[in-house]
Structure formats: structure tokens, C-alpha cells
Amino acid sequence: MVQHLTKKLLSGMTLPGIALAAMLGIAAVPAQADAATLRMAWSQDATGLDPHKQTAFSSLRLLELIYEPLVRLDASLQITPAIADSWQFSADGKELTFKLNPKAKFQNGAAVTSADVKASFERILDEKTSAAARANFLSIASIDTPDSATVVFHLSQPDVPILTAMSDINAAIVPASEIAAGSIGTTTIGSGPFKLEKWDPNSKEVLVANKDWAGGATGVDGIDISVLPDETAILAALRTKQIDFALLNDPLVATLVPKEASLQLNRVPVLAYHVLQLNPSRKPMTELKVRQAISCAIDRQEVLDTASLGEGKITGPLTIPALATDPNQLFCYTRDVEKAKKLMAEAGYADGFSASVIGATGEPPTATAEAQVIQSQLAEIGVKLDIKMMELNVYVDAWLKGDFDMAIALNGGRADPYTMYNRYWTKAGNLQKVANYIDDTLDGLMQKGRTETDPAARKVIFGDFEKHITEMSPWIWLYTSYSYTAQQKNVGGFVPVPTGSLFSLAKVTLQQ
């Protein structure tokens, strides 16, 4: 029945949105009660509310509307003010001083002070926190707070990417009082444009405007977010005007939006990347030639075309346009099954082996299809792959523990390659359990890139990083895709960005 209805929907036939939602077994989106409230939907809910710990896109997209970092990135990936009004490096690059916006307040009415900034970064740096971005800030030797509006970070060495790292919501500033109370993740007191008034996990979130936000008045009084796990139901709700705005992940659904005269699709290339992660700590992926054979056996274009309708492009590790290496220059980006079989034989696995691959149901929506294409391709070299799809929170737990043979993943990109990868590919990286591979060359190149200030020299360093890591093949990078949002044509002011951030919802307006 559900499959039949979905086929009807995708062919353009219409059903009343509420009736369709009921038939699909999903809660109907409430009718709009207030024109100043943006009605929104997405298909994956947050997995937690601690901005320092969350890695799932679904969590970060919610938390960036509630919390703020010191600085943020604009649509051109340039650093702009957030909690901080201004910042300056010392001449030797070993001090970074911030002046805070005097109007910045937390949502409990308290001013954001240098003490809150210091406490937030000390919490991130504390290994017991298990902060997602801890590795980005290991150059911080000490933090001074000469007055309530001034913060001075003393660095153990020049650290070019640290300012970009501070723009991430994983570096959000939280109240020192809440850290002391141990309530981060159970209460949500940020300084961002919206307050979280209600959260019904896997059902809805209600955000209300923060009238004290230092960024000025928001464009709407609030955002009501419905969690609809079926993106065809999201499209139906858009068609019937039950919702104003939606985040879409599935290209199969997103590409249907332009066919609707009343809707607008926002489509922008993103820095995030689809990847097959191998676990080089598990046999036989401990063998370099086995990992290389897997890389040579995979047709990345077929994965992209089948799983994502060709909506994207093949990528190496770096997705930042100014720094990315042409994939044709990287190891085995042209499929070579005979070479793969030869490598398998040389590694002692001419008859292949059995392994499993994990993926998250619906995150991304292409995960199952990616796994199936890769399963078929690897079968040609004797690799019998068992696909294990999991709920997102179960997948994230297994992923963080490195409890997998292989994993289908959609990982976030960053505007700087060191910020993007140091947590995986440095010896001090806090996600080494996920990567399960490091060598002196990778660590050395990352450290060189961290301190090099000349852009041309950095491009060479990170080009060498790309060539080395794709040859070592701990992961098999596949492709980058797009960020999709859909909206009614009376929604104005949303600006899509390459990071996938939804922060510009703070200034969205609804025209009558």
C-alpha cells in the first residue's frame, strides 16, 4: 500500500496532504496558526543536544539555531563575527585575541562573558568531555580573560586553521554556570537566534525567537519543525502548503521539486563527502594491498549515478574547490578490476573474503543504494559483503567506537583541510578510533599544513596529503553532492551555503 501510494506521488498525482500522511503512518503537519511562524520539516531528528559532542548533521542543523560560536562562515566561506566583534593574531601567530560583542546575551538573560568562552574551550579540551572538535584546539596552551569582554588564547605554535575551527557549532560558547551544573545537553541555553521551547524526539521541535539576540530581530517569531521520516511525505506537505520550508536529503525527491510551479528548490554544492570507510585495524583490511584492491574495484561514477542520480561529482579527500586535487591524479580513480584481483592475490586473498558494511537508515538516504552498488562491485573480486543498515543513533555509536569492518558515511567538510581532517589523520586526533589508521607521513603533512601561512605552499602540502592517503586507501572517497532545501515562494531571505548550514533561517521572512 505504501509503495503504491509513493509511486502515485512520484508520478505527480496528488492526494490531500493530511490523508496521505495518515496513509503513510506519519503524524500530519499541523495547520498554520500564525503567519509569523515558519513551518518546517526534515527527515532526521537530532540525536542529542550537547553542541560540543554531536557529530550527526541532524543535530548540528538544530543546534546552530540555538547556540553560537565566536565567529562563523558566510556563504563565501569567509570568517564573519558571531559572539566576537573582532579578533587579531599577534605578529608571531601565537596569540589570538577576541573582543566580544557587548550585546551578546544567553537566552537566560545573562551576558556572554570571557569567562564563558574560557569555560567552553576548557570543556572542549577536557578529554572526559569527548568533544567532537577537541583535536582542532590542541595548540591552545592557556586562555586569559583580562576583562569580561576580552579573551586571549595563547598558542603553543602558530595555528593557521584555528580561526576557521572556531566557526564550527562544535565550538559553541555555552554558559559557564551550566557547565558547572553539569546540565549541558539536558538544558539548551545558547546565545543564538532561537530558543528551543519543546523537543519531542523523532516528532517535532518548537523554536521561538530570542528577543535578546545580539544579531538583531529574527525574520519570524518562531520555527515549528516536524520530523517526517518519509521525504515523499515532506514533498506532499509542501505541495499542499502545510509546510513552508524543508530540508531534503534525497536527490530522488529533491529533483522533483522544480516540477512544482508553487515551489522553489535551493541547490548548492557542499563540502561534505560520501565515503566508504575501511577499518584498517581489522583483517584483512590490515593489508595495504587489500585496501588498494578495494579502491581499484570500485567504480565511483556508477555509485554516484545509481545512488544519487548523478547529482554530484567524484571527489578526492579535499572538497574545498581552491585546494582539491583532480581525482584523475589520485590512486586508482579509474576502475581496474584486473589490477584489483592481482593485488588481492599478492596479499594472499585470491579467493576473496567475507566482511560487513554498516550504514545509517536514511542518513544519508543514498546509503543503502551506495552499499548495494559497492557490494556488487566488490563481489567481482571475491569480496562477499554483508550490508547492515542501522538506526542513526545506533550507527553513530558503532561508528564512534570504530566497531565496523567497513562503513558507508556522509562526513562533513570544512573550509580548511586541517580543520576537516586532523581529528582522523593526526596521531593526536580524537577520532582515531574511527579512522584506525595513521602513519608518519600523514601526521607530518597535517602538521606542516597547520603552521604554513603561504597559500601556495599549503596547496602543495595538502596535495601531497591527498596523494598519499588515497594510495594508502584507509578510506575510499566517493563523491560530493548538494545541499537541498525546498520552500514556498513566499519565503524570502534563505541563503544556502557550502557547509550545509541552515543558520540563515534566522533572517527568513514570510511574505503574505
Image (tube, grey):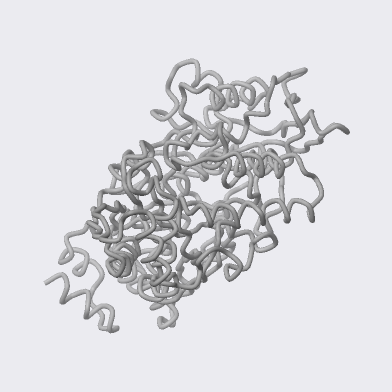
* Residue 470, placed above or below residue 420: below
Between 13 and 510, the one nearer to me in the picture: 13
Q: Give x and y (percent) for residue 192.
A: 56, 40
User: Residue 350: percent from the left, percent from the top?
Assistant: 30, 61
Looking at the image, the residue that sits furthest to the right is 91
In the rendered structure, the answer to whether residue 90 lies left or right of residue 375 reads right
Q: Quadrant of residue 396?
A: top left
Name the quadrant containing residue 421. top right
Q: Which residue is depicted at the point 40% across and 38% down?
A: 197
In front: 70, or 352? 352
Quadrant hosting residue 306:
bottom left
Residue 161 location, x and y as percent? 69, 42
Foreground pick, 486 / 32:
486
Residue at 55% x, 42% y is 425
Residue 346, horizontal then vertical, whole percent: 39, 58
Residue at point 81%, 36% (across, down): 88
**Is 307 located above or below residue 261 in the figure?**
above
